[in-house]
Image (cartoon, rainbow, N blue to C red):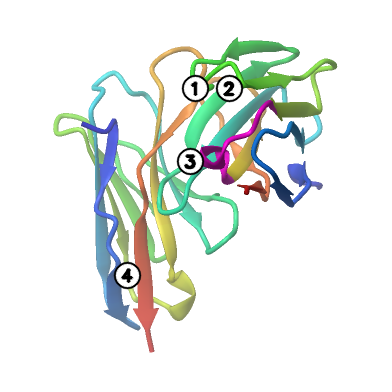
Amino acid sequence: RKEVEQDPGPFNVPEGATVAFNCTYSNSASQSFFWYRQDCRKEPKLLMSVYSSGNEDGRFTAQLNRASQYISLLIRDSKLSDSATYLCVVTATSGTYKYIFGTGTRLKVLA
Amino acid sequence: GAGVSQTPSNKVTEKGKYVELRCDPISGHTALYWYRQSLGQGPEFLIYFQGTGAADDSGLPNDRFFAVRPEGSVSTLKIQRTERGDSAVYLCASSRGVSADTQYFGPGTRLTVL
């Protein structure tokens, strides 16, 4: 079983739609959680950190459920520019803080 | 300010050759990470430096892979006797090194082994 699992998609949604991505992780001792965005042939860029209390940044909302070891990302009012791969990231429990990535979920927003 | 830079952006080599990939982290960042990303996959951890020392090299796939960071800034990932399976994008990231600080990624080096 992979340490971080995501549905690879693709998710094809019309502009203006709301779309949700989920991610599960296997190590209950994991400490930090992030969503990164990766455009085609580009490097990953931080979208947002994820906290148990939930956090929101404009049209984006992230949520962590430690009991279920589950992370979510909600995108409201999708834009064409949201088309990208969304990577779920969990930090290792050892002292290195190395990132453990999911495979990524591809999103395509259609006009 | 300047972000993480990596050179070359693309490298094509022949099976069995030696390659070096360079990473220049954000100024002042003490932590430096190397990851490898294959097509359709998320990046996979290779090695982590805190300062000059390799604090965790558990992700290096075998002894053909080696990395250095002699002055605590620029790092070089070295691959000996390259194999076709080494073809991937090699990403470098840096962070301030404080706790689980955000990692900032460079644009990557796309390595193709023919």
Determine which residue is flagged by label 4: A76
The label nearer to you, 4 versus 3, is 3
| 10 Å crowding of disc 4: few (<14), some (14-19), many (20+) | some
Q: CB of mark 3 within 8 Å of CB of mark 2?
A: no
Q: Looking at this rendering, what residue extends furthest in the left direction?
A: A68
Determine which residue is flagged by label 2: B47
Determine which residue is flagged by label 1: B59
**Within the magenta stretch, is there residue B83?**
yes
Compute the Cα span from label 3 to label 2.
12 Å
Q: Name the chain under label 1.
A: B
Horizontal side of residue B32 vs A107, given as left or right: right
State which quadrant residue B64 falls in. Answer: top right
Q: CB of mark 1 within 8 Å of CB of mark 2?
A: yes
The secondary element bearing badge 1 is classed as loop
**Within the magenta stretch, is there residue B53?**
no
| 10 Å crowding of disc 2: few (<14), some (14-19), many (20+) | many
Query: Which residues make up the magenta segment?
Result: B79-88
